Image (cartoon, rainbow, N blue to C red):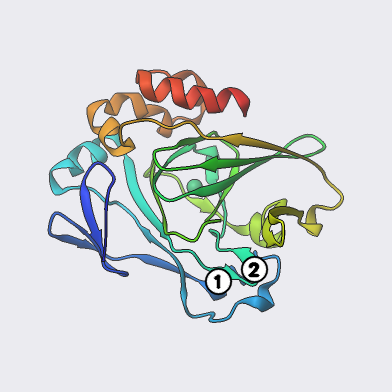
Amino acid sequence: MLSFNFGVSVVWDGFYLYVEGESFEPFIRKLGDLSDVLASPSQIRDPDAPAYFVYRGVHRNHDVKTFREKRIRHDITIIPPILNGNEPVKTYGHGHADDYPEIYQVIRGRGHFIFQRRTRDGYEVYLIEGEENSILPIPPAYEHITINPSNEVLILSNLISENCSSIYAHVREKRGACIYEVITNCGLKLVRNPNYEDCNVVIKRLRAPTISQSLYELFLYFPDSFDFLNDPTKFKEHVVSVKEFCVSASELLENL
Ligand SMILES: [Fe+2]
């Protein structure tokens, strides 16, 4: 049993997520599913074991109306610490159809986030470190992958348009992002994915800013301020309506 708080206190029993008496069932990504995108897929020990758990549409009953009216969904992702050979567990990775943006917040643990975008002659890649309460706006057109580099569970909250669908084909075809993060004797190290060999890859490291309030609560207090999630063209100019969120999110976006 694990208790945590994304603005609402919840309990996770290793499968179900309980929110005020209601239970949410996960979509489970198995370790075997990650064989498409790992540096060394042969090092997966138990392909049927869960790699991570995704709970979509996690709301308190009395908050559902606001989420529906705004066509925005709140999800929780739980990524336990697992090693596949020398590669820490990570999400499969995806981009979004129609370039919808998204926003993450780290609820518990530490994460490394890879955001990558095609440029005219290659790829622009950001490796962003996040800790508890970090806020990570994902601008339009960035593929994104989350790594749990720690030995503790990583829990994320995210807000996304209900109309957004994920595209996995490109990440699958390239066998992951431009970079893999692996553990060596000297600690974590970035390794280039050879499937991007002919591309010019520019890697930048950033630390995500933190905010004191949960994304979930901010959305309920200021739902109009998140309208940009349904309009990718308004992303940058609209991440300005909630001061605390704005200051922190802009701090990250200025560097992206
Ligand atoms: Fe996404």
- View extreme (front): residue: 186
What amino acid is at disc 2? Asp
Q: Nearer the viewer, residue 63 or 131?
A: 131
SS type, badge 2: helix
Q: Looking at the picture, how far across and down is residue 232, in whole percent? A: 50, 31
> At x 42% / y 28%, what residue is drawn?
228
Taking 254 as reference, is 226 left or right? Answer: left
Work out whether 220 lies above or below 165: above
The tag on residue 187 is none
Q: Are marks 1 and 2 in contact (CB under 8 Å)?
A: yes
Res 14 → quadrant: bottom left
Q: Looking at the picture, how far across and down is residue 245, in whole percent? A: 39, 25
Query: What residue did someone put label 2 on?
Result: 36
Query: What residue did someone put label 1 on?
Result: 33
> For the C terminus, which image quadrant?
top right
- View extreme (right): residue: 198
Res 24 → quadrant: bottom left
Q: Looking at the picture, how far across and down is residue 155, in whole percent? A: 39, 53
Q: Looking at the picture, how far across and down is residue 207, in whole percent? A: 56, 35
Classify mark 1 as within 8 Å of ligand 1 or not, answering yes or no.
Answer: no
> At x 42% / y 59%, what residue is drawn?
153
Label 1 neighbour load within 10 Å: few <14, some 14-19, many 20+: some
SS type, badge 1: helix
Q: CA distance from mark 1 to mark 2?
A: 7 Å
